Structures are given as C-alpha cells and as structure tokens.
C-alpha cells in the first residue's frame, strides 16, 4: 500500500468528519465519501510522556498523544476502515541538524468509505489492557486486543462470564 506523506496532501481539503452517537458511545463519522489510502485529517493533541494512560491516548513519537476532538472520538473495530500513521518530517537539509524532527499523526483510510460511515481504527491494545469488544464486525475478536496478543488475552479472560461486560 502506497501512502503519500502529508506534504503531498496539503492542497486537499481535510476534516470531512463529524462526531455523532454510535453503538459505542460517541464516534467519528465522515461527511463525504472517501477513497482508499486517503488522508482524512491530521490528529492534533497534547504530547504526553511514554507510559501515559488515558481512555483516548495514542502512542506517538516515543511517547503518547492525547488527541483533541474530533479524532479523540474514533472507535475501535476489529475490521477497521482507517489507520493512524505517524510521520516523521524534517525541516529540510540546511536546518535539519539544529532541529528536532517534527512528528505528525494522521488518519488515513484503508478502504473506500461511504458518506456517513463511522470511521474506525484497530486500537491494538495489549492483553493487559483488553476489554470486551462491541464492534459488530463479522471479524470481531471478542476483545479489544492486538491480534498477535489475542491468545494471551483469551487465556487471561478464560474464567470470565461468557458475554459478560
Ligand atoms: Zn470487535
């Protein structure tokens, strides 16, 4: 999958998204149909130290990002239509040595989405952080958990009440 850096997308209008009620609290929706591998918008927020934990935080630039609305409301799906991509940008040859790299977080589509469709990502949480999933996808793993950590997740939850929440 070829994904173009943000500079390429600067001419494109962004943030064709809105926040609305979803089956899982509030969610992020698109107000326009979008193609596959398209930048939806840049995720702004506060940078936090590594190990920062909150309901919304994302791994970012060696630490974490506490995202501002609207992107803080993006829900998990086990079969997501979007992905978060962290870009490391340089300011150019001459100034690069005296400047820290610039990091940007962007939301991109993984497949075409229809107008009004909820945008979702795979949260990719570790087994220790896993909670029951209600994404309603036919591919639902049952837990919000990284796919490669799922065996450990299922082992940890094997004595849980079936479908308990
Ligand atoms: Zn699921």
Image (cartoon, rainbow, N blue to C red):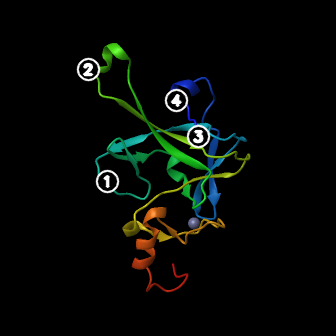
In the rendered image, residue 95, in percent from the top left (x then y), is placed at: 31, 16
Q: In this view, does 67 lie to the left or right of 134?
A: left
Question: In the rendering, at what x and y percent does residue 138 appear?
Answer: 66, 67
Between disc 3 and disc 4, the foreground one is 3
Q: Point out which mark residue 1 bears.
A: 3
Answer left or right for 134 relative to 161: right
In the image, ligand 1 is in what quadrant? bottom right
The residue labelled by disc 1 is 52
Q: Residue 4 lies in what quarter of the image?
A: top right
Query: Do callouts 3 and 4 mark residues in contact (Cβ within 8 Å)?
Result: no
Above-or-below relation of 16 to 138: above
Q: Earlier in the sequence, mark 3 or mark 2?
A: 3
Marks 2/4: CA–CA distance: 22 Å
Q: Distance between the residues labelled 4 and 1?
A: 26 Å
- Disc on res. 98: 2
Q: In percent of the image, x 38 and y 24: which residue is there? A: 90
Q: In the displayed structure, would residue 128 be above or below residue 50?
A: below
């Amino acid at each position: 999958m070829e994904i173009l850096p943000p500079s390429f997308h600067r001419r494109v209008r962004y943030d064709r998204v809105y926040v609305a009620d979803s089956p899982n609290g509030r969610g992020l929706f698109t107000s326009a149909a979008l193609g596959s591998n398209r930048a939806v918008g840049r995720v702004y927020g506060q940078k936090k130290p590594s190990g920062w934990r909150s309901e919304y935080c994302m791994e970012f630039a060696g630490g974490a990002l506490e995202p501002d609305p609207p992107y803080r409301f993006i829900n998990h799906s086990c079969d997501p239509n979007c992905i978060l991509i962290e870009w490391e940008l340089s300011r150019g040859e001459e100034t690069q040595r005296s400047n820290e790299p610039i990091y940007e977080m962007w939301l991109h589509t993984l497949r075409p989405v229809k107008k009004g469709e909820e945008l979702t990502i795979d949260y990719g949480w570790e087994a220790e952080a896993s909670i029951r999933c209600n994404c309603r996808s036919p591919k639902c793993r049952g837990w919000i958990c990284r796919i490669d950590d799922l065996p450990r997740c299922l082992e940890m939850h094997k004595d849980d009440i079936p479908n308990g929440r």
